[in-house]
Amino acid sequence: MAEPPTTKTKNSTFSTAALAAKKQTAFDSMMNASKRKDLTAESPQPRKKSTYQVSWRKLLGDAIDHPERDSRVFYYDDDFSFVYDKYPKASVHFLLLPRDKKLSMAHPLEALKDPIFLAKVRVAAAKLKASAAKELQRRFAKFSKQEKRRLDILNGVLELDDDEGLPGSRDWEKGIRVGVHTHPSMEHMHIHVISKDMFSGYLKHRKHYNSFHSRFFVNLEEFPLGEDGENKRKREIWHWPDVDMICWRCGKNFKNKFTQLKIHLDEEFDEWKAE
């Protein structure tokens, strides 16, 4: 390979490529220094990180204050917004958000002490649970053995016997859980309505699974907790990320082996939807 051309000086010989590289390095250094100065002047790095953390915790605010313009909201009334979870941890994952300012900023264990509010939540959660069950049916009925005869009749593959009524559908609501976290990550109060399967690309960590399948998750039917129950829940929250991961369907203990659990959850999901 030919040597690069050179430029001679009084004291030494430099390659043209080396001179160009030296100029480019000086230019880059100048530009980088300018960028650093601008970034520092506009928003120091620690402040920028803090601003992101605060805004992330408040992401549910628009669904409460302006549900009519939030694409995650699929129904709302004066009391609640019904929302698709942006990062679902299961095949179906909805959120129920109280819209009252005082309640929306309260801790769920405190807010659900109020019997009037708890009654409203139960009614709204029942509606959302029914919607979640219909979504499961819409997506997975074609795989279900319990649904096969019913679907074959509806699709004209089979005919009803003379004395036979249309078979009932599978009870998809059995696959739905409703509850709250004892230490919510988001600022605004929200009730989870989530399918048990935990089949989702957003389920990426041990803590994601345990946040729904450990005592960190309080089922709505457990309320009112009472003082003893509430205190016990609060004491347990600090240990929930480290507890063993137990399969929601078969009860197998995966301890801390999240990768193995994920593979197993895929298998369980296929079997569950085929029931």
Image (cartoon, rainbow, N blue to C red):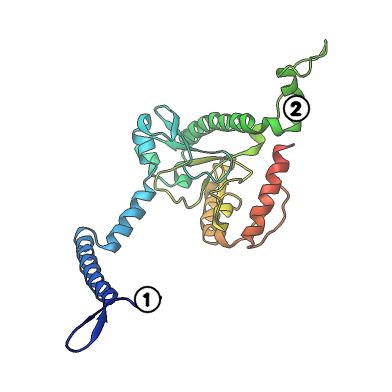
In the picture of the structure, the residue carrying the numbered disc 2 is 148
Q: CA distance from mark 1 to mark 2?
A: 75 Å
The quadrant holding residue 50 is bottom left
Question: What residue is rendered at 19% in x and 64% in y?
Answer: 34
Point out the residue furthest to the left here: 10
Q: Nearer the viewer, mark 1 or mark 2?
A: 1
Question: What residue is rendered at 44% in x and 51% in y?
Answer: 185
Amino acid of disc 1: Ala
Q: Measured from the top left, where is residue 108 in percent x and y?
A: 46, 45
Question: What residue is rendered at 71% in x and 41% in y?
Answer: 272
Residue 2 - label: 1
Residue 192 - label: none
Could you say which is closer to the camera, residue 225 or residue 245?
Answer: 245
Asked if residue 149 lies left or right of residue 120, the reply is right
Crowding at dot 2, Cα within 10 Å, few <14 / some 14-19 / many 20+, comes out as: some
Amino acid of disc 2: Lys
Point out the residue furthest to the top here: 162
Point out the residue furthest to the bottom here: 11
Task: Tell me the SS state at disc 1.
Answer: loop
Can the viewer see residue 152 in this picture? yes
Point out the residue furthest to the front here: 2
Can the viewer see residue 171 in this picture? no
Crowding at dot 1, Cα within 10 Å, few <14 / some 14-19 / many 20+, comes out as: few
Asked if residue 271 lies left or right of residue 30, the reply is right
Task: Tell me the SS state at disc 2.
Answer: helix
The quarter of the picture where the N terminus appears is bottom left
Could you say which is closer to the camera, residue 257 or residue 66?
Answer: 257
Q: Is residue 248 above or below residue 165?
A: below
The quarter of the picture where the C terminus appears is top right
